[in-house]
Amino acid sequence: MGKVIVVTSGKGGVGKSTSTANLGTALAVLGKKVAVVDADVGLRNLDVIMGLESRVVYTSMDVLEGVCELEQALVKDRRTKDLYLLAASQKNNKNDIQPEQMKKLCLELKETHDYVLVDSPAGIEQGFQNAAAGADDALVVTTPEVAAVRDADRIIGLLQNMAINNLTLIINRLSPEMVKTGDMMEPTDIIDILSIDLIGVIPEDKEIVVSTNRGMPTTYNHKSDAGQAYKRIAQRLEGEDVPIPEFKSGGFAGWVGKLFKG
Amino acid sequence: MQNEPRPTVELKGFRDGMRLIIDPEASMDQIESAIMERMTNLGDSLSGLTMNLDLGSRVLNDEELIHLKNLLNENYGLEVKQIIGDSEDDPGRTESHQIAGVPALHGNERVYDQFVPANEETRFIRHTLRSGQIERALEGNMVILGDVNPGAEVVAAGDVIVLGALRGVAHAGALGNTSSVIFALNLLPTQLRIGRFITRAPAEQRRRQRTEIARVLDDAIIVEEYD
């Protein structure tokens, strides 16, 4: 029996889908059987980010309506073994699916996969409720911005109300230079407010734009800082003790070397 | 305070709960707009609570009463529990008010100077309040064993004590008691309210943790280091 993890944030544009695609890929590269589920009904894009758009035939809606079997709707990744995508319907909207239905889908998927990563839509409405319905754990994604942290805090409260208590935090798009000059929130400031465990920090990386447009997760790019950071999160999810580098304002000259050259 | 004109509506805490006291001289329109004005500062702080409507010598017909009751309920989530009045012109109105589904009391027991500072009970919250969460203690004080994050709100009729960081909004003396205080081990609020006074955090950001207490002095909220 695997684990269902919802990837969520509250605020839009902080990197939920990018994180889902990259972590799903990184976990599959580690030899795990992974299903990534796009829960953003009506605004799907996980298939695009993973470069699987042209292979989507059925969606989660088709499975729920009995048009096809779950196995038929799972799109096999073209590069990595044991990585599957369940796409969202583009024709429907978020209220066409009920939390109970999502729960059932997740239960079925985790019987045959080690990890089920559910990519949540932004917001706290039914789309989010659906995405979190079947989750065992949650990865909360934020960027080092006050608005994103505020929304993450709201989402954490809602997840705790849903009795999802194993919550970990991904800080995305951190610019080490800006943290150094004191122009960006430090991870410690963010953790201070959110008071959940940090599972990884993804540095700002232009490669993400390129890889997202090409439909090729940066995890495959050994030169990408972000891609490598996602790989380390996958290792941490697998229980490996991979230290998280410290990002602090001032006197951090050491960390870049430690993190990316070491 | 004695010389100030009596407000059209007043919200006060009494031993039997919260009362909305209405100026008997005011017109329905005045009452309505005064309620809206009085509630603006409270946001939805009072939603889900019950209150008594104190009409004094004012006589309202059923229609007006139902209208007020619905206004309070639909806009602010307040439920009218009892009508209190002391009109002598209309001895039959106690029965008439029952029509609105609200029991009525004759106001002989309505004593204004029995206003309770509302610091008798203390409610404890043993976790951090996150953005969007609101906790109230309208019977007394509130103690939070945790943080109050930005976007969260804590409201008390008496004092607010945060044994953690207060980064959100705190409202002490929410029913009008300006002798209430707000205390936090780390006071970094978005906004502080005591009674009818409001203050916001200074624009500059502070990093060092500081234990402080806020209270009202000369019609303004002041913040002092606590030691």
Image (cartoon, rainbow, N blue to C red):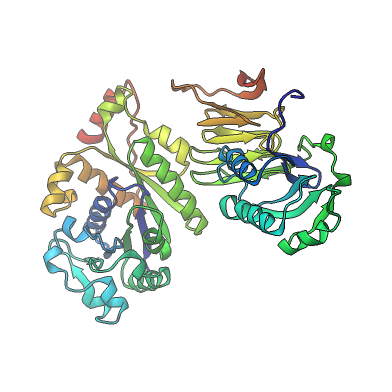
Going by the image, does A79 lie left or right of A144? left
Residue lying furthest front: B89
Residue B48 visible in rendering: no
Q: Is residue B39 above or below residue B62?
A: above
The residue that appears at 29% across and 82% down in the rendered structure is A66
State the image coordinates of residue B142 (x, y, percent, origin top left).
Answer: 67, 39
Q: Looking at the picture, does residue A153 appear above or below residue B209?
A: below
Residue positioned 71% across, 35% down in the render: B158
Q: Residue at x 89, y 45 (%)?
A: B108
Q: Give residue A12's position: percent from left, percent from top.
A: 31, 48
Nearest to the observer: residue B37 or residue B49 = B37
The N terminus of chain A: image quadrant: bottom left
Horizontal side, residue A79 vs residue A258: left or right: left
Looking at the picture, how far across and down is residue B183, in whole percent? Answer: 64, 29
From the viewer's side, name the closer residue of A212 and A251: A212
Residue B70: quarter of image: bottom right
The quarter of the picture where residue A5 lies is: bottom left
Q: How many marks?
A: 0
Which quadrant: the C terminus of chain A? Answer: top left
Q: Is residue A256 visible?
A: yes
Residue extending furthest right? B108
Q: Nearer the viewer, residue A15 or B55?
A: B55
Name the spot of residue A144 as percent of width and height, x first. 34, 36
Between A259 and A247, the residue placed more toward the observer is A247
